[in-house]
Amino acid sequence: MLLGEGVTETKGLKVEEIRAEAEKNIKCPVNKALYYMTEFINGQMCGRCLPYSLGSYEARERLRHIVWGKGTEADLFVLRHVMNGMIEGSLCKKGKDTARFVLDWVATGVYEEHVEGRCPDEECAALREYRIIPGKCVMCVICKEACNYNAIIGEKKAPYLSGFPPFEIKQNICIKCGNCVDTCPYDAVEVIERKAKVGV
Ligand code: SF4
Ligand code: SF4
C-alpha cells in the first residue's frame, strides 16, 4: 500500500474510493497523494483534455521526487501549478476532484518539511535512518536475528561495556522495515530523520 515503501500495486477504484483508501491506510499526506495519483493513473482515462492526462502524470513524478527524498521547491511549485491547471482545464468532475484532493494534502504543510528532509509521520523511508544507540545496546543479538536482510553486524558479548564494539546497522543494506525497532527489548534502536543526520 505505501508507495514510499516501494509497493506499487493498484486496484482500479473510483476517485472517491481511492481517496478513502489513502485516508484510511496512509498517514503521510505526500504518500497519500502519491498513492492516490498512482491508482488514478492506472484507472480509466478518456484522454479528452490535456490538463487531466498530462497533469496527472506530471504530478505523480513530482510526488515521487518528494517521497523518495529528492524533492525541491520547484517540485512543489510545479505540483501546485499543475493541480490548479487541472481544476481550471479538466472537462470532467473527476479531473477537478483529483486536483482538489491533492491540493488539500499539499495544504497540510508537510510537503515543505519533506523538501527539507523530514517526514513527520516517519513513513517515507528515504527520509529516515535506523541507528543503534551504543550506550543503550547490551549486545543481546535479538535485533540481528529479527533482521531479514542481514543488515545488522555485531556479536553477542557479555557483560555490557566489555570492550567489544556495539551492534551496528549497515545503512547500504537496511531496507528500513523497522523490525529491529519493534524487537529490541532495550529501546536501543532509534529512527533518525535525514535532516537531523546531516545537521541541516
Ligand atoms: S536488540 Fe537492542 S540491545 Fe540487543 S543487540 Fe540489538 S540493539 Fe542491542
Ligand atoms: S530496519 Fe529492518 S532491514 Fe534495517 S536493520 Fe532494522 S530490521 Fe534490518
Image: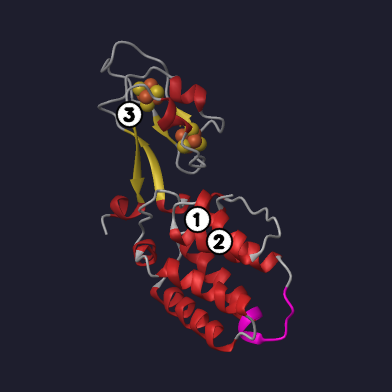
The residue carrying pointer 1 sits among few (fewer than 14), some (14 to 19) or many (20 or more) residues within 10 Å by Cα, namely some
Q: Earlier in the sequence, mark 2 or mark 3?
A: 2
Q: Which of the 4 image quarters holds residue 191? A: top left
Q: Is mark 2 within 8 Å of ligand 2?
A: no
List x then y, in percent, for residue 149: 56, 33
Indicate yes or no whether the magenta region holds residue 47: yes
Work out how far the residue at label 1 is from the one at label 2, CA to CA, in angstroms. Answer: 6 Å
Magenta segment = 45-53
Q: Nearer the viewer, residue 17 or 25?
A: 17
Q: Is mark 1 within 8 Å of ligand 2?
A: no
Q: Residue at x 45, y 52 (%)?
A: 27
- What's the residue type where badge 1 is placed? Glu
Marks 2/3 in contact by CB < 8 Å: the verdict is no
Q: Earlier in the sequence, mark 1 or mark 3?
A: 1
Disc 2: which residue: 19
Marks 1/2 in contact by CB < 8 Å: the verdict is yes
List x then y, in percent, for residue 171: 45, 42
Q: Residue at x 39, y 65 (%)?
A: 111
**Which label lies toward us, 2 or 3?**
2
Q: Which mark is residue 188?
A: 3
List x then y, in percent, for residue 126: 46, 53
Q: Which mark is residue 23?
A: 1
